[in-house]
Amino acid sequence: MSSFRKALKSKQKNHHERSQPGFRNHLGFLEKKQDYKLRADDYHKKQNTLSALRKKALDKNPDEFYYNMISSQLQDGVHTKNKETHEEVLTEEQKKLMRTRDIKYVELKRVSEAKKIERLKAELHLLEADGKQKNKHTFFVDSKKEVESFDLARHLNTDPGLVDRVFNRPMLHTLETKTVKGATEPGSLKKLAKLRRHQYKLLSQRIDREKKLFVISQKLQTRIDIQDKRRRVKVSKETPNAAAIYKFQAKRQR
């Protein structure tokens, strides 16, 4: 029990490193162990870096060549890249041809997106993704008693599981002779609604992509027009959603 009492942290006194004695204050701050640890780690890190660089220099192949040798030079002990850049010199006709190819590619992609959008619209018939109507359908009855006993499925002459559907809601005599996909399987209606939501999300993404491609095409066409016609007046600035608008001076063509 006595050994346990000696081992208790609450009974022990905290050990504090002594501060700088008064007669040695002129020597500055007395270094503690944590300060020494930081200084020692920094020293060893620098020594390890120097030894690694020394080993790398000893193992280097003097006949080795790499392209940075001819694109940089040593200035004041620091490797700096040459300012001379090898840019391709293109004529105005070459630039115009490149932009024409770009606009043709963008138009090709835009037409492809437009066809996919039309195909999706034809499949979805622009129906609600959740299968629920936004508008209300009001039924009129003659008395309050009929309101209390009103049965929507019986009034529409359909199955109770198909009442919430906006589309493909056949009557009972149709169900007796034919089967409706998803009408009898449990949980299949939710799966179909989830699939429709995914299709509508895909349609929205394709519409946004087609709009962005149309804006890019307009901007490229504007740059081509500016290159052809010199005398112009800028009407509106270019924005992320629209190309810049210019007015060109009318010139008689002979």
Image (cartoon, rainbow, N blue to C red):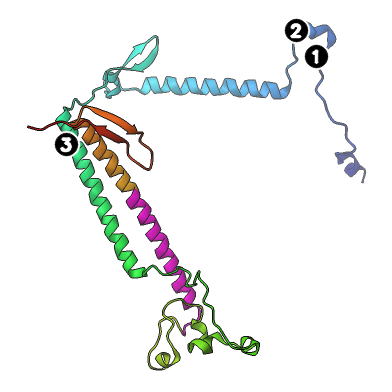
Q: Which residues are magenta?
A: 184-211
**Which residue occupies 24% across, 48% down?**
107
- Inspect the image, locate mark 3, and give the three-letter code of the amino acid beneath it: Leu
SS at circle 3: helix
Give the percent coordinates (x, y) of residue 198.
43, 64
Give the percent coordinates (x, y) of residue 80.
36, 16
Mark-to-mark CA distance, 1 and 3: 80 Å
Q: Residues within 10 Å of mark 3 (few under 14, many from 20)?
A: few
Q: Residues within 10 Å of mark 1 (few under 14, many from 20)?
A: some
- Inspect the image, locate mark 1, and give the three-letter code of the amino acid beneath it: Gln
Q: Nearer the viewer, residue 17 or 104?
A: 104
Q: Residues within 10 Å of mark 2 (few under 14, many from 20)?
A: few
205 to 27, vertically: above or below: below
Choose the circle earlier in sequence order: 1 or 3.
1
- Inspect the image, locate mark 2, and give the three-letter code of the amino acid beneath it: Leu
Contact, CB < 8 Å: mark 1 with mark 2?
yes
97 to 38, vertically: above or below: below
For mark 1, what is the residue? 20
Choose the circle earlier in sequence order: 2 or 3.
2
Q: Nearer the viewer, residue 172 or 38?
A: 172
For mark 2, what is the residue? 27
User: With 106 as the anchor, is 164 left or right in this view?
Assistant: right
For mark 3, what is the residue? 97
Give the percent coordinates (x, y) of residue 109.
26, 51
SS at circle 2: helix
Mark-to-mark CA distance, 1 and 2: 9 Å
Choose the circle earlier in sequence order: 1 or 2.
1
Q: Is residue 210 covered in magenta?
A: yes
**Which residue occupies 45% across, 68% down?**
129
